[in-house]
Image (cartoon, grey):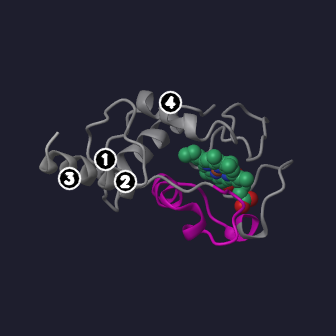
Amino acid sequence: MNRLQVLTLLGASLLAACSGEPARPDKPEAPVVQVADITRLTGDAEAGRIGFGQCRSCHAVEAGVNRVGPSLHTIVGRPVGTVADYRYSTAMAAAGGAWDEQRLYDFLENPRGYLPGTKMTFVGIKDGQRRADIIAYLKTQAD
Ligand code: HEC
C-alpha cells in the first residue's frame, strides 16, 4: 500500500466514525436522509420491522407489555404518556397531546433533545428514512 492509499483509508474510516450511525443494514450504501417533514418520505414497514430491533430491548409492540419503556401497541395517534400501569418521567407525563407521525419523527431523531427530562436513554436516529420506516412499522401495530 502506498502513502496515498493509506491516507484515503484513514479518511474513509474517520468519516465513518464521525457520522456516529451504523449504515442501514438493508441498504448500507444509502445516504442519510435529512428532511424536516415526514410527509415527504414513504416509510417501508418491513424495513421498519427490522429497524425496530433498536427499540426492542426496551419496548414491546404487544398490548399491555411494558419493559424498560411502555408498550408501543397503537402508539401512532395515542395520547403521550398514557399507558396506565407504566411510570413515566414527569416530563413525559406532563407533555400532553398525541403521538402523530410528525411528532414521533421529531422525537426519535433526538429524544432527550426533543423532550428534556425524558428517561428514554436512547441516542436517536439521524436518518429520516429509517425513522419513517420504523413509524410505518408501528402503524401496523394497531388494533
Ligand atoms: C434504553 C431503552 C429504550 C430504547 C432503546 C428505546 N426507548 Fe422508547 N422509551 C423508553 C423509556 C424509558 C420511555 C419512557 C420515557 C419517559 O417516561 O420519559 C420510552 C418512551 C417512548 C415513547 C413514548 C411512549 C408513550 O406512551 O407516550 C415512544 C413513542 C418511544 N419510547 C419510542 C421508541 C422507539 C420507536 C424506539 C426505537 C427507535 C425506542 N423508543 C427506543 C426506553 C427506550
First in sequence: mark 4 vs mark 1: 1
The three-letter code of the residue at mark 2 reads Ile
Query: Under 8 Å from ligand 1: the CB of mark 1?
Result: no
**From where the camera sits, is residue 78 visible?**
no
Q: Estimate the x, y position of residue 28 in percent, counting from the top left.
A: 31, 35
Residue under numbered circle 4 = 49
Q: Is mark 4 on a helix, strand or loop?
A: helix
Q: How many labels does the image show?
A: 4
Tell me which residue sits at (25%, 54%) in the image.
11
Task: Say few, some or many: other residues with alpha carbon within 10 Å of mark 1 (under 14 / 14 to 19 / 20 or more).
Answer: some
Residue under numbered circle 3 = 7
Looking at the rendering, the stretch of residues picked out in magenta corresponds to 92-121
**Is residue 111 shown in magenta?**
yes
Task: Say few, some or many: other residues with alpha carbon within 10 Å of mark 4 (under 14 / 14 to 19 / 20 or more).
Answer: some
The quadrant in which residue 116 appears is bottom right
Residue under numbered circle 2 = 38
Q: Estimate the x, y position of residue 37 in percent, counting from the top left.
A: 34, 59
